[in-house]
Amino acid sequence: MTEWANREQSARDRLKVTFETAADRYHAARPDYPDELYDTLIAAADLRPGARLLEVGPGTGKATLPLAQRGFQITGLELGPRLAETARRRLAGYERVTIIQAPFESWQPPRGERFDLVFSATAWHWIDPAVGYQLAWRWLRSGGHLAIWAAGHVLPDDGDPFFLEIQDVYDEIGEGRPADRNFPKPGSLPADRAAIEGSGLFHVSLAQEFVWARTYTAAEYIALLDTFSSHIAMAPWQRDRLYGEIRRRLGARPSGTVRRHWGAVLQVASRLD
């Protein structure tokens, strides 16, 4: 492994455990995914009632719950013990859901067990790409599917200007965006087709973008930021300065709120036998 790859792996391992400190806030603050996304996933992966699903990184169960409500049998692998316990509490009424506190990279299913779908919602980027696709392929049955999506911030042309205006505070505290990194617009979200198909193990059969919006008060928006690894990792003085300015600027608005657009590209890939 190269020195650059070692640094990237180290940074990924360091940041992915920060969510443990936000386990109780994560479920309330993070947005729900659109119902249309699940309907599209079920159709694209040809999931039948009772299908067996393996979820990589369920967190507090944001994507687990809607699929559990649709009657699927789900095994969720969650690295963080606090997140896993939160997910178990929230999914306690679903006997066909099992949350296991274990890393995907080293977990082994019961002998002979294979899944109809391996999926990951806003968590696949934490998986070591050197092994992620190989393990997904291994634990899928013949004809099974892999599904990946991740919710991120998009800024349409008529979107709320607050996010551009607050960048001066991020610059001030040393957390500014790189000069060549703009907020993505709807219709331009990147997909992982090259990486998925480059593994030689899958064929991408669907890549569809979903965009939705949510309005936040200052307190709600700060609670959301407190679930982002980049903000959790900030020094206390950085968060104090940023959050204080968010409260002040939103407090000066007649509505006292900010509207944030979310986008996700659902990618479904069939296992190559």
Image (cartoon, rainbow, N blue to C red):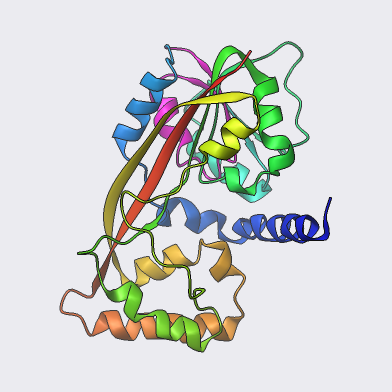
- Specify whether residue 107 is in view: yes
User: Which quarter of the rendered picture does the C terminus lie within?
Assistant: top right
Q: Residue at x 49, y 84 (%)?
A: 171
Tell me the magenta residue range.
49-74
Is residue 212 part of the magenta span, yes or no? Answer: no
Q: Is residue 172 left or right of residue 78?
A: left
Asked if residue 192 lies left or right of residue 166, the reply is right
Q: How many marks?
A: 0
Residue 211 lies left or right of residue 29; in this view the side is: left
Which residue sits furthest left? 254
At x 46%, y 34%, the residue is: 267
Image quadrant assignment for residue 3: bottom right
Residue 46: percent from left, percent from top:
42, 15
- Residue 102 x, y percent position in the rendering: 72, 38
Q: Where is residue 111 shown, x and y percent of the image?
A: 77, 13
Instruction: From this view, report whether residue 177 is shown above or below residue 133.
Output: below
The spot of residue 216 in percent (x, y) is 29, 64
Return the residue nearer the eye: 254 or 265: 265
Q: Is residue 101 visible?
A: no
Does the segment drawn in magenta span residue 70? Answer: yes
Residue drawn at x 34%, y 53% as measured from the top left: 262
Q: Which one is in front, 177 or 18?
A: 177
- When asked about the image quadrant of residue 87, the answer is top right
Say if 162 sits above or below 138 in the image. Answer: below
